[in-house]
């Protein structure tokens, strides 16, 4: 019985965090392709 | 005559990754593996809460990380009002966005944990109510950041809101001490710890896992925001160039 709640809690977190991470990384790739190299340099490159 | 070979031009990657994010990503993999191993497999069930205690190792670290992100928003907002920093404006915004996501998950996992522990998913208890209020207030902050207006004015208004909104963080944190609450008081503090052994290890690993994940995510999300800002800037510059060319063409004797 208690494992159901544990799986639900961890499952909700995994889906939300996973979706956010994937959308952030994909948005970063899409924007990077649209900008010139000098506009997408970061401090530690 | 000697030929000097020029070093090859360094290619700029078409993503937001770098050595820093790869190092942080490695730390995330290690800490999450250990956290899930301890939290879900190695640590024993609790005498009172049984297996549902494992939600503690997820719920509390996320709650603390949401407070950390809102603190970053506070610092960023102060810096924006002091010197109009674009860096801090973007940082304040992405930190609030991640904080809202964490807080939403804290409320959701708290509801899931509440059912086996209190017998209900939701109660208008001081801690739950103040957390829900904080969620709505920071959602409002994100709405302000998306208003269609002068970017400098928008940044300043968001900064004022970001400073005022922070009142919710200590209010939620101390709500269980200020009012009678169904929610338990602090389980772990610097001076008093009510856990030990594998349970304490699981909680500590949860904190470490969420902290490294937050750092990794914050860097990536900030870079996306920086790219969005660069995109807006380049769009604006192109618009100004086009308008000037149009104006020059319309002048008497101008290029037609």
Image (spheres, coloured by chain):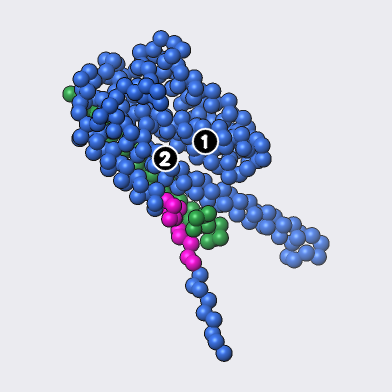
Q: Is residue B49 left or right of residue B2?
A: left
Which corner quadrant holds the C terminus of chain B?
bottom right
Q: How far apart, in angstroms, are the residues tagged by discs 2 and 1?
A: 12 Å
Q: Are marks 2 and 1 in contact (CB under 8 Å)?
A: no
Stretch of the chain drawn in magenta = B10-21
Residue ID at (51%, 32%) = B71
On what subunit does the disc labeled 2 rest?
B
Tag 2 residue? B214
What is the quadrant of residue A17 in the picture? top left
Position above or below: B150 against B43:
below
| Pick the front one: A35 or B189 | B189
Taking B43 as reference, is A43 left or right?
Answer: right
Pinpoint residue A20: horizontal percent, then vertical percent. Answer: 39, 41
Chain displayed in green:
A
Prevailing secondary structure of the magenta residues: loop
Q: Residue at x 65, y 35 (%)?
A: B81
Where is residue B242 shown, x and y percent of the image? Answer: 67, 57
Mark 2 secondary-structure assignment: helix
Residue located beneath label 1 in the image: B72
Host chain of mark 1: B
Chain rendered blue = B
Residue B118 versus residue B59 in the image, above or below: above
Q: Quadrant of the N terminus of chain B?
A: bottom right
Question: Which picture quadrant has residue B148?
Answer: top right
Disc 2 with disc 1 on a shared chain = yes
Q: B42 or B253: nearer the eye?
A: B42
Q: Residues within 10 Å of mark 1 (few under 14, many from 20)?
A: many
Residue B195 against residue A18 in the figure, above or below: above
Q: Secondary structure at mark 1?
A: helix
């Amino acid at each position: 019985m208690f494992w159901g709640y544990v799986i639900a809690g961890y499952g909700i977190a995994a889906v939300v965090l996973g979706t956010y991470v994937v959308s952030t990384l994909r948005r970063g790739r899409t924007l990077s392709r649209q900008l010139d190299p000098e506009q997408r340099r970061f401090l530690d490159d | 005559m000697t030929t000097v070979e020029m070093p090859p031009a360094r290619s700029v990657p078409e993503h937001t990754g770098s050595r820093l994010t790869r190092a942080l990503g490695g730390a995330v993999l290690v800490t999450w593996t250990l956290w899930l191993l301890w939290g879900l497999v190695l640590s024993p069930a609790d005498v009172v809460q049984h297996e549902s205690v494992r939600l503690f190792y997820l719920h509390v670290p996320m709650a603390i990380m949401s407070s950390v992100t809102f603190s970053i928003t506070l610092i960023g907002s102060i810096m924006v009002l002091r010197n109009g920093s674009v860096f801090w404006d973007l940082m304040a915004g992405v930190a609030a966005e991640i904080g809202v996501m964490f807080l939403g998950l804290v409320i959701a996992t708290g509801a899931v944990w509440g059912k086996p522990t209190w017998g209900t998913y939701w109660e208008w208890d001081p801690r739950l109510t103040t957390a829900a209020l904080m969620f709505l207030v920071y959602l409002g902050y994100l709405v302000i950041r998306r208003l269609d207006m002068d970017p400098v004015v928008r940044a300043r208004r968001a900064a004022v809101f970001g400073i005022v909104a922070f009142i919710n963080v200590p209010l939620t944190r101390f709500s269980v001490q200020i009012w009678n609450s169904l929610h338990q008081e602090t389980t772990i503090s610097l001076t008093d710890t009510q856990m030990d052994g594998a349970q304490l290890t699981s909680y500590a690993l949860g904190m470490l896992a969420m902290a490294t994940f937050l750092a990794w995510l914050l860097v990536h999300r900030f870079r996306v925001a920086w790219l969005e800002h660069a995109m807006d800037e380049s769009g604006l510059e192109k618009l100004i160039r086009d308008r000037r060319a149009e104006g020059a063409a319309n002048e008497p004797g101008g290029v037609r």
